[in-house]
Image (cartoon, coloured by chain):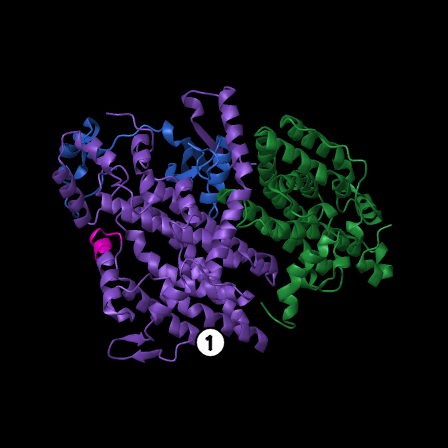
């Protein structure tokens, strides 16, 4: 057997280099070549590997990092996990802007904890993506250079304190619906990251709802602020948190729906997705309508009405063309989010350089070597 | 490798003992230039909730691995030795499908 | 002689131990609140995502300390003000934090220099507070000391990495130290309030902790190949509500939403 330089969750270096490009450019060559060649070299043909992979998916087993996998599967995962991670990091900004202005110390603490979780979720997800042979540095570069994107939901401004509540209640609420099925997604590291994320997101949604409830029970001015925030965040959550329409129920034209459907079918066949975007979107609307009623807030869609026959709430078809125009990559807020992120990255370059130089120096100066030094531990007793 | 890139520092696998009586369990990885930074990053990332007892970080490239799908000789034997499992043998008495356990 | 607004409002109070203690806890609470507020501004702007996480952890602990301290202070001073009354309705001149905690973030090295000075001081002080006779306060001191000890490790680690990193990081770290050092002396100032409290043994004075602090920070700074600054001047005035001009913006931002909604509940 080969000694492999990773805890099973990280492909060997050669593979990593070969696959590095895959996460950052859509036109990259198939990423799994080195990987499949290495495995195939052990005597198994490509067909046999594919059959084994398909059988695992069929049985609902998870695929683990060192398993053989089709290039398309790897590429789709890298794309989805990276976009998800970027959304967590970019998503810190609209709420992060209110950390210094939170109107009570309790709310300030809650918001710090929430924004901090988002940084943590980004890191869980980058770590999951890295098991596919890409490097976080490359993924971040791709984000900064516009080759990869975060969810366009966050290309909206958070204009008032109530926006932090609306974002948590609506967009995090949408995220939970989106993400709960991902806890059973076919790729092991992604599923495990999502289980952590989902456990923590539940707190985000509840605190958002609680924040909104406090505003609704407060002065008329506070309630008006809450309504205004919901008016502005409802559609972004419905339209953008669930991805493009992939059935005609999503209110799209037939061509858009067909395009979306093709992608979703592939993702579902591989067990990466479990439901269509439109199915999840409906689930979200069904969940929010009664919550809004309890808050005494109006969702800004006059077409929302219970449909006895379908057993769901009807809602207005989303005007996707408007969204495409308003939320292209080059809007004021899209630029702002990326510029903010890039500024932090660029201004921090000297700090990262210093940390790297320090580590290199420590290593060179004969930091303790040998097996005993390979595990670094911190226990409760040693902690402080 | 460009060391200035965010994320470029070494990768560390993180193991957490969440409660007494449990083994350290692999929870994910962090990027950090050195072991102290790695421990601190792991603490911030993986122990925000609960009251974990202990953390280990191990350089990812210090882990040696084998997995069954690579047809390593390591795992070929395990599947074909049913006699390692109690179910291979009749229960000790007739009380239920599980039988009474050996203690 | 320090004159806090509390004393101005109630001149007879200076001899009352509860009001003295309220004044003292308000100072500690303002330190934590204002420093926490400064650190919040780093979140989404840190050099690494890991630092967004680390700095928010620290900010979160500091806000927690502020809440405990302000709540207790409001109970003791007889005004019945809550933590939020104290944080969001006082004016700049009523805040009694040490100037160190309100210094602008500057670059990452300046923030780390400020963290180094504060965490070593706060850890020593909270450890001492853990031995005070008031059980609630002692328990708070013990908990806070543990949390700040982790913040101290964070600061120590970065001083070392920046000091021994690149030529640029060493220069910036040294500049950061020079920038904040004149403001460190105020942390150990002892006025009548503290003297009266320390004399009865109610709470420890920070003044005797200074040599230990000097030893600790000197070890970290010199271990990082840097020099402990010897400033030709020292700043003060924060404890009596005389702040920097930048502080007005900090308080304006802190209180903006709260003040825009009079009578609001959050």
Residue B25 located within the stretch drawn in magenta: no
Q: Secondary structure at mark 1?
A: loop
Measured from the top left, where is residue B73 in percent x and y? 19, 27
Name the foreground residue: C125 vs A49: A49
Q: Which residue sits at x=71%, y=40%?
A: C180
Q: How many marks?
A: 1
Q: Mostly what secondary structure, the magenta segment?
A: helix
Q: Quadrant of the C terminus of chain C?
A: bottom right
- Left-right relation of A91 to A160: left
**Crowding at label 1, few (<14), some or many (≥20) Cα neighbours within 10 Å?**
many
Tag 1, which chain?
A
What stretch of residues is rendered in magenta? A265-272
Task: Name the residue located 60 percent from the left edge and 52 percent from the top edge.
Answer: C64
Relative height, residue C100 to residue A105 (above, below): above
Residue A68 appears left or right of A103: left
Let me know if residue A59 appears in the view.
Answer: no
User: Color of chain C here?
Assistant: green
Residue C27 seen: yes
Q: Which chain is purple?
A: A
Work out whether A154 lies above or below A41. Answer: below
Q: Tell me: C160 left or right of A198.
A: right
B66 or C67: which is nearer to us? B66
Is A369 left, or right, of C1 in this rendering?
left
Q: Was residue A270 drawn as part of the magenta stretch in this picture?
A: yes
x and y percentages locating residue A336 in the rendered image: 50, 56
Q: Which residue is mark 1?
A: A297
Residue C190 drawn at (x, y percent): 81, 44
Percent of width and height locating residue A11: 30, 34
Q: Determine the colour of chain B.
A: blue
């Amino acid at each position: 057997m080969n000694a492999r330089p990773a805890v099973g969750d990280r492909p060997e270096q050669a593979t990593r280099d070969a696959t590095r490009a895959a996460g950052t450019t859509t036109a990259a060559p198939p990423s799994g070549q080195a990987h499949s060649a290495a495995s195939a070299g052990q005597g198994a043909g490509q067909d046999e590997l594919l059959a084994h992979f398909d059988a695992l998916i069929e049985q609902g087993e998870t695929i683990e990092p060192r398993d053989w996998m089709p290039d398309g599967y790897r590429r789709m995962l890298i794309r989805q996990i990276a976009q998800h991670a970027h959304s967590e990091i970019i998503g810190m900004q609209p709420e992060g802007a209110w950390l210094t202005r939170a109107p009570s110390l309790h709310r300030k603490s809650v918001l710090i904890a929430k924004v901090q979780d988002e940084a943590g979720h980004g890191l869980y997800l980058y770590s999951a993506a890295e098991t596919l042979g890409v490097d976080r540095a490359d993924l971040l570069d791709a984000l900064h250079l516009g080759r990869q994107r975060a969810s366009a939901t966050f290309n909206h401004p958070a204009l008032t304190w109530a926006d932090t509540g609306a974002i948590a209640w609506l967009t995090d609420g949408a995220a939970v619906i989106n993400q709960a099925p991902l806890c059973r997604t076919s790729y092991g590291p992604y599923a495990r990251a999502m289980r952590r994320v989902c456990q923590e997101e539940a707190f985000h949604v509840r605190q958002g709802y609680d924040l909104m409830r406090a505003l609704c029970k407060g002065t008329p001015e506070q309630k008006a602020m809450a309504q205004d925030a919901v008016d502005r965040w409802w559609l972004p959550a419905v339209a953008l948190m669930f991805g493009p329409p992939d059935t005609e129920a999503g209110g799209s034209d037939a061509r858009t729906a067909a395009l979306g459907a093709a992608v979703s079918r592939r993702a579902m066949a591989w067990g990466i997705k479990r439901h269509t975007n439109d199915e999840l979107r409906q689930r979200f609307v069904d969940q929010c309508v009664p919550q809004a009623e309890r808050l005494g807030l109006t969702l800004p869609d006059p077409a929302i009405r219970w449909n006895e026959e379908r057993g769901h709430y009807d809602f207005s078809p989303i005007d996707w063309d408007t969204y495409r125009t308003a939320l292209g990559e080059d809007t004021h807020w899209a630029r702002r989010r990326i510029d903010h992120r890039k500024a932090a990255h660029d201004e921090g370059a000297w700090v990262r350089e210093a940390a790297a130089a320090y580590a290199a120096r420590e290593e060179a100066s004969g930091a303790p070597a040998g097996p005993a030094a390979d595990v670094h531990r911190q226990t409760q007793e040693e902690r402080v | 490798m460009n060391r200035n890139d965010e994320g470029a520092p070494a990768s560390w696998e993180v193991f957490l003992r969440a409660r007494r009586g449990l083994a350290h369990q692999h929870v994910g990885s962090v990027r950090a230039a050195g072991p102290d930074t790695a421990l601190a990053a792991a603490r911030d990332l993986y122990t925000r909730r609960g009251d974990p007892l202990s953390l280990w970080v191990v350089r990812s490239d210090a882990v040696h691995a084998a997995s069954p799908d690579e047809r390593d000789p390591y795992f070929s034997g395990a599947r074909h030795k049913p006699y390692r499992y109690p179910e291979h043998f009749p229960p000790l008495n007739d009380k239920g499908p599980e039988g009474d356990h050996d203690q | 002689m320090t004159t806090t607004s509390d004393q101005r409002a109630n001149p007879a109070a200076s001899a009352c131990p509860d009001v003295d203690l309220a004044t003292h806890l308000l100072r500690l609470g303002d330190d934590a609140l204002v420093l926490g507020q400064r650190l919040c501004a780093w979140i989404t702007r840190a050099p690494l995502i890991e630092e967004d996480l680390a700095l928010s952890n620290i900010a979160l602990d500091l806000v927690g300390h502020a809440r405990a301290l302000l709540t207790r202070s409001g109970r003791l001073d007889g005004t019945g003000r809550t933590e939020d009354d104290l944080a969001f309705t006082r004016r700049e001149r009523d805040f009694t934090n040490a100037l160190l905690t309100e210094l602008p973030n500057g670059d990452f090295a300046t923030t780390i220099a400020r963290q180094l000075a504060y965490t070593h001081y706060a850890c020593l002080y909270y450890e001492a507070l853990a031995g005070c006779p008031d059980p609630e306060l002692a328990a708070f001191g013990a908990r806070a000391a543990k949390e700040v000890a982790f913040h101290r490790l964070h600061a120590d680690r970065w001083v070392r990495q920046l000091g021994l990193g690149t030529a640029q990081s060493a220069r910036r770290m040294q500049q950061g130290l020079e920038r904040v050092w004149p403001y460190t002396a105020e942390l150990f100032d002892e006025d009548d309030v503290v003297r009266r409290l320390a004399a009865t043994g109610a709470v420890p004075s920070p003044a005797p902790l200074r040599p230990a602090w000097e030893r600790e920070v000197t070890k970290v700074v010199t271990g990082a190949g840097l020099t402990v600054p010897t400033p030709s001047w020292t700043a003060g005035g924060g404890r009596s509500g005389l702040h920097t001009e930048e502080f007005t913006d900090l308080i304006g931002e802190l209180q903006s939403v709260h003040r825009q909604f009079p009578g609001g509940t959050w």
